[in-house]
């Protein structure tokens, strides 16, 4: 049976939920999400959302800060578009029920500071902004009669006919079978791929599915070599790289090495509030110099009451691991956090395939260039979800096309799970060791060679054994790792988040990278 909808939204983070709500006044929308409606990176966001809201701030200043952080590779038109629409995106969130923290004395919104921003411009809900955004938008979606939701449904592949997206094949995790969905327009809002690295701040679902689906469908991907490592994740064997928000440094926390010495002044005049690529590389250098496994983040010199009020979630979580942030310096390390590249889109979220849109972390709009500035991501999710919804409303022309149903009748046996678990670990370890914060030609080439075997094993498994959700994610993860390595090898310079010791200098004429299955013959 084929399920029909006007609009198919794949993913229910900030981007997917916003797009669905914006489209629901005109269309029947179907959201599919591979876990629950609120399982997403969005839910975990801490620091907040960047926008020009303070009297002393200007749009031009936010634009310039974003361009500087992006290290010469941002698309200025996309940067202007996003930031000029920042205030209305925040107003839309407030109208949708999101409650942001206010100053106790003045009753206006409290704005915090993060790396790369030359003004206080981060609106937030204490230190759990994502939870507030996610829960509020999900509540609104659940009440909307034009939006249907399928949780625990995982998109396996897009359905393409004559360079046009006409729907998707979707794995029902409960029934363990694949559905065929026909849609007038399809929106990929599947988040990032940071799970491709062994240590990451991201939840388990960040396996890069959207990039892999888009790749197999024939989309262009851009800037996939720029993987952001957040400088400060809690270093503790059981903490699963719990994020310690950059807002702590915004409110005065200082990075120190094992000897208790501050070190950021040696690396950048903006010290602890330099853009993330610089802070992560400085931590990496300091750890290598001192031979230690982590550095420390210290906010204990600030007022205890203020710390607990501003960072209640982080305070509580750290206590669970035996650290009182009001008294102890916290052990921290960089961990994979954000995929700056993605499916190349226009300002309206259009991809190079008709009726296929990409928004949020899955997209590459040109906003982030070679390094995303803190808290610009949630902003991008809302602004571009809204612009893509507008574009769909103006251009929707659903013509019924013949669609081939997924063949569930093929009898294939179950594969051994050990093959999935082994290749999952091997890929993430390989990427961490060879394609991390500091890269070299030798390590990238070794990564390419090693991954070739894993890729072939996984593709042969795909042909011969029945689908499981773990396997679908592994297949995507391995493909995305391959795309990252190819993109990193192609960039013959160091810039932003891509630092290669064999090409340490910036190439002034370098441009954003573009890669697709039509241009890379070695895949
Ligand atoms: P996500 O929120 O990741 O949602 C992706 C959705 O797609 C999920 O629902 C997932 O289940 C679904 N999905 C994925 N694959 C499939 C598939 N194959 N089939 C069906 N569904 C699928 N950014 C900021 O701007 N400010 C912050 O303060 C901030 N803090 C952060 C803190 C943490 C710990 C993390 C991890 C990220 C943070 N970020 C922050 C980044 C930001 O949260 C994300 O970039 C943003 O939320 C991405 O939103 P999204 O809607 O694109 O994707
Ligand atoms: C943080 O709170 O440090 C995360 C902010 C971001 O990733 O934008």
Image (spheres, helix red, strand yellow):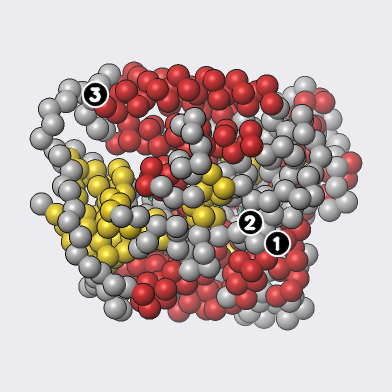
Q: Residue at x 43, y 44 (%)?
A: 215
Report the disc number at residue 66. 1
Between residue 242 and residue 181, name the one nearer to us. Answer: 181
The reply to whether dot 3 and dot 1 touch (C-beta < 8 Å) is no
Q: Residues within 10 Å of mark 1 (few under 14, many from 20)?
A: many
Label 3 element class: helix
Q: Residues within 10 Å of mark 3 (few under 14, many from 20)?
A: some
- Tell me the CA gap for discs 2 and 1: 7 Å
Report the disc number at residue 464. 3
Q: Residue at x 46, y 42 (%)?
A: 518
The reply to whether dot 2 and dot 1 touch (C-beta < 8 Å) is yes
Q: Is residue 231 left or right of residue 414?
A: right
Q: Residues within 10 Å of mark 2 (few under 14, many from 20)?
A: many
Asked if ligand 1 lies within 8 A of label 3, the reply is no
- Residue 76 appears at what percent x and percent y? 67, 66
- Residue 470 appears at what percent x and percent y? 33, 33
Q: Is residue 135 left or right of residue 31?
A: right
Which of marks 1 and 3 precedes in the sequence? 1
Q: Residue at x 62, y 80 (%)?
A: 107
Residue 447 image-quadrant placement = top right
- Tell me the CA gap for discs 3 and 2: 40 Å
> Can residue 269 be spotted in the picture?
yes
> Can residue 153 be spotted in the picture?
no
Label 2 element class: loop
Q: Is residue 376 left or right of residue 428?
A: right
Q: Is residue 62 above or below residue 95?
A: above
């Amino acid at each position: 049976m084929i399920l029909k909808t006007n609009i198919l939204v794949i993913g229910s983070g900030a981007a997917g939920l916003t797009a669905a709500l914006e489209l629901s006044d005109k269309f029947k929308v179907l959201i599919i999400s591979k876990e629950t409606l609120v399982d997403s990176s969005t839910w975990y966001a801490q620091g907040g959302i960047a926008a020009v809201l303070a009297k002393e701030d200007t749009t031009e200043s936010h634009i310039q800060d974003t361009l500087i952080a992006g290290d010469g590779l941002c698309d200025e038109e996309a940067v202007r578009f996003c930031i000029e629409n920042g205030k209305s995106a925040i107003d839309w969130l407030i109208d949708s029920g999101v409650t942001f923290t206010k100053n106790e004395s003045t009753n206006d919104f409290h704005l915090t500071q993060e790396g790369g921003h030359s003004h206080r411009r981060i609106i937030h809900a204490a230190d759990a902004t994502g939870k507030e955004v996610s829960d509020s938008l999900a509540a609104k979606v659940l009440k909307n009669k034009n939006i249907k939701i399928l949780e625990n449904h995982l998109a396996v592949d897009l359905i393409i006919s004559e360079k046009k997206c006409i729907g998707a094949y979707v794995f029902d995790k409960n029934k363990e079978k694949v559905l065929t969905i026909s849609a007038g327009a399809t929106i990929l809002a599947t988040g990032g791929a940071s799970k491709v690295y062994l240590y990451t701040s991201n939840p388990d679902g960040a396996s890069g599915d959207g990039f892999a689906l888009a790749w197999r469908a024939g989309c262009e991907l851009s800037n996939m070599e720029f993987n952001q490592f957040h400088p400060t994740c809690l270093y503790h064997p059981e903490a699963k790289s719990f994020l310690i928000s950059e807002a702590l440094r915004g409110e005065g926390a200082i990075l120190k090495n094992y000897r208790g010495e501050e070190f950021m002044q040696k690396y950048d005049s903006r010290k602890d509030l330099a853009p993330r690529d610089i802070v992560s590389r400085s931590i990496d250098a300091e750890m290598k110099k001192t031979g230690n496994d982590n550095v420390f983040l210290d906010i204990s010199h600030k007022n205890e009451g203020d710390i607990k009020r501003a960072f209640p979630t982080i305070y509580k979580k750290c206590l669970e691991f035996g650290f009182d942030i009001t008294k102890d310096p916290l052990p921290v390390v960089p961990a994979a956090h954000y995929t700056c590249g993605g499916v190349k889109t226009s300002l309206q979220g259009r991809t190079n395939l008709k009726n296929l849109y990409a928004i949020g972390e899955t997209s590459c709009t040109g906003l982030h260039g070679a390094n995303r500035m803190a808290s610009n991501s949630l902003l991008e999710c809302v602004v571009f979800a809204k612009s893509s919804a507008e574009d769909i409303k103006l251009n929707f022309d659903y013509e019924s096309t013949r669609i081939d149903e997924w063949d569930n009748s093929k009898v294939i046996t179950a594969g051994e799970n050990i093959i999935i678990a082994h290749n999952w670990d091997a890929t993430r370890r390989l990427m961490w060791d060879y394609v991390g914060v500091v890269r070299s030609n030798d390590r990238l080439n070794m990564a390419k060679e090693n991954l070739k075997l894993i890729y072939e094993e996984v593709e042969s498994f795909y042909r011969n054994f029945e689908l499981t959700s773990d396997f679908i994610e592994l297949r995507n993860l391995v493909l995305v790792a391959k795309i990252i390595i190819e993109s990193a090898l192609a960039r013959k310079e160091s810039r932003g988040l891509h630092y290669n010791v064999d090409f340490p200098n910036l190439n002034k004429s370098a441009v954003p990278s573009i890669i697709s299955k039509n241009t890379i013959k070695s895949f």
